[in-house]
């Protein structure tokens, strides 16, 4: 019953996307991929042209928030744009995680415009191997 | 008997190399701006390093190609909002470009290409004097 209530609150907050829900299907930036490992969750996002210093990542037990900005290049007077396809500006996205994580041990790497965030599973969320004893 | 031999022969001659698998190719978002001195292209190719990017100019056809490494080894993909693949885009240049001074740099997954205009193509501003 409590879990259900929590989901309702999640839907009201417009910025929270449920990672596994098919609810929020509007396009959010950045696009995220999630890879589940035995010990952790790896989230990747494509953020070309963003400086690592302009990224702000915070993680809690059951969600993480990604904030940042891609700055547009300085312009002088004599430039004429023939094409402008790349977007600029600030972005913010909060995502609920499929299982609880140990936020203190989170690691973020940013290489070649790709963010890789590794979130170790909380101890109680690790799959436990159950020994089979002979009768 | 002879039929079996033929089948085996076919199997051996097919390449098993991973390069034979088709790779997805995306069109990278690109900004193009022009100054008096040069044409500057900026293309988003997240995941591509300097050594993964190839720029070729044949005649007036400019081709950009960026290769991306596959990701996520050892884990199960549970949620995908974007696909991985290489980047390719072809442009036709309308300006004369000084081929020897083309500069290409890759930083944070963005390719920046500076194509200096050939002398004849440069905009020359003419001062207007009072008669």
Image (cartoon, helix red, strand yellow):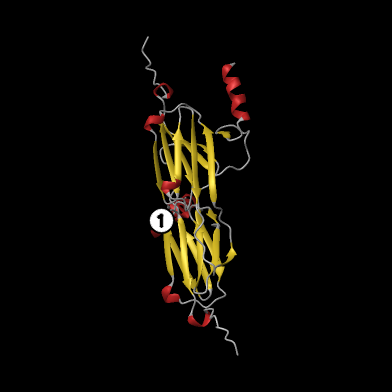
Q: Is residue B28 above or below residue A79?
A: above
Question: Chain for mark 1?
Answer: B
Q: Is residue A28 above or below residue A3?
A: below
Find residue B32 and report its horizontal and vertical position in percent: 55, 65
Quarter of the image with the N terminus of chain A in it: top right
Question: What residue sits right under mark 1 in the picture?
Answer: B49
Q: Quadrant of residue B19?
A: bottom left
Find residue A32 and report its horizontal and vertical position in percent: 52, 41
Find residue A62 and report its horizontal and vertical position in percent: 48, 28
Residue at far front of view: B130
Task: Please state which of residues A23 and B84 is positioned toward the viewer in this rendering.
Answer: A23
Q: Is residue B33 above or below residue A122?
A: below
Task: Please state which of residues B6 and A114 is positioned toward the viewer in this rendering.
Answer: A114
Task: Please state which of residues B72 and A8 is positioned toward the viewer in this rendering.
Answer: A8
The number of discs equals: 1
The residue at 53%/46% (across/down) is A90
Q: Residues within 10 Å of mark 1 (few under 14, many from 20)?
A: many
| Residue B65 visible within the image | yes
Q: Quadrant of residue A6?
A: top right
Q: Is residue A106 above or below residue A69?
A: above
Find residue A126 and report its horizontal and vertical position in percent: 41, 24
Q: Quadrant of residue B81?
A: top right
In the visual, does B56 lie left or right of B93? Answer: left
């Amino acid at each position: 019953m409590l879990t259900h209530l929590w989901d309702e609150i999640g839907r009201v907050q417009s910025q929270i996307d449920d990672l596994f829900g098919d609810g929020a299907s509007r396009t959010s930036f950045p696009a995220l991929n999630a890879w589940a490992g035995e010990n952790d969750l790896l989230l990747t996002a494509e953020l070309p042209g963003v400086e690592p210093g302009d990224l702000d990542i915070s993680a809690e037990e059951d969600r993480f928030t990604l904030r940042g900005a891609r700055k547009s290049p300085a312009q002088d007077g004599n430039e004429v744009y023939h094409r402008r396809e790349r977007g600029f500006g600030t972005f913010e996205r909060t995502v609920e995680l499929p299982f609880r994580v140990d936020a203190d041990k989170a690691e973020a790497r940013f290489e070649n415009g790709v963010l890789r965030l590794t979130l170790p599973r909380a101890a109680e969320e690790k799959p436990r191997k159950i020994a089979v004893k002979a009768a | 008997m002879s039929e079996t031999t033929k089948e085996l022969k076919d199997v051996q001659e097919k390449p098993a190399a991973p390069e034979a698998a088709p790779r997805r190719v995306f069109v990278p978002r690109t900004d193009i701006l022009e100054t008096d001195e040069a044409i500057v292209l900026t293309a988003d190719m997240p995941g591509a390093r300097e050594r993964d990017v190839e720029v070729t100019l044949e005649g007036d056809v400019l081709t950009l190609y960026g290769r991306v490494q596959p990701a996520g080894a050892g884990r199960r993909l549970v949620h995908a909002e974007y696909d991985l693949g290489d980047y390719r885009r072809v442009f036709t240049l309308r300006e004369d470009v000084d081929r020897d001074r083309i500069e290409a740099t890759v930083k944070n997954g963005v390719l920046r290409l500076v194509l200096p205009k050939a002398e004849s193509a440069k905009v020359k501003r003419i001062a207007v004097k009072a008669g």
